[in-house]
Image (spheres, rainbow, N blue to C red):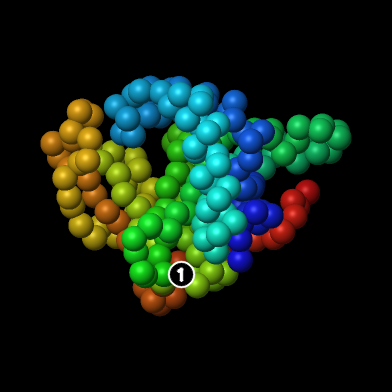
Amino acid sequence: MGNEELIIETDRLVLRPVSIVDTDHLVELDSDPAVMRYVTGGTATPREVIEDWVIPRALAEASHRGGAGVWVALDRLDVVAARSVGDPHAETSGFVGWFGLRAPRHSSQSEFELSYRLRRRAWGRGLATEGARALVQLSFTELSISRIFAGTMAVNAASRRVMEKSGLRLARLHDCADTSIAGSERGEVEYEILKTHWESSSFPWAQSARIATSMIA
């Protein structure tokens, strides 16, 4: 299953595959120093990198990696409101951020790396957890994936909480690749969840997302 037409809905979010029409939103997101603090130390991603590498790479993975890719996260209420009045831009309304599943290049295991990035105004509302849980559910119920993992800097407490609330547990600690970022001396953490653990734990949110091939009003 590819994710080119795969729409995921939660109580408050609509996740749809990223496309070139999302360029402006992605540039704006990556231009916020607070958003990029634990990614680049606050440095913005150049527009040409997003246009020529970030989006094409996500589209390529969606076509070839069996469910991998990047989903743009939209506020569900904004999408529904825009569609109700026939807004031609409804499917880009209420941009919140993005969530991703990526197959490690050199891994022979059936595993995905989970990632996410949200605008600052969406922080503190539980939206990152809601979207992350949906992708964990997708991976273990619709795709042939046995392990999900995610990583961040050890000092990034907010992202670590998202991982923990999504069922992932601390697996290992290692050095930061970029030692120029403040807090890098504390290293990076990797969290993981195995399908066997997910199936045996009976998480109350485990079947909360709706997965479809078209938008639900």
Direction right: furthest residue: 86
Q: Quadrant of residue 90?
A: top right
Please provide percent x and percent y for residue 161.
Answer: 34, 47
Of residues 16 and 210, the one drawn nearer to the viewer in this rendering: 16
Of residues 216 and 187, the one drawn nearer to the viewer in this rendering: 187
Please provide percent x and percent y for residue 22.
Answer: 62, 33
In percent of the image, x 74 and y 51: which residue is there? 215
In percent of the image, x 45 and y 54: which residue is there? 102
Residue tagged 1: 145
Along the horizontal axis of the image, is 11 left or right of 150? right
Along the horizontal axis of the image, is 217 left or right of 212? right
Along the horizontal axis of the image, is 191 left or right of 125? left
The three-letter code of the residue at mark 1 reads Ile
Q: Is residue 156 above or below residue 206?
A: above
In percent of the image, x 45 and y 34: which residue is there? 123
In percent of the image, x 55 and y 39: which residue is there? 55
Per the image, label 1 sits on a secondary structure element best described as loop
Along the horizontal axis of the image, is 193 left or right of 211? left
Q: Is residue 84 above or below residue 120?
A: below
The answer to whether one can see residue 11 in this image is: no
Q: Residues within 10 Å of mark 1 (few under 14, many from 20)?
A: some
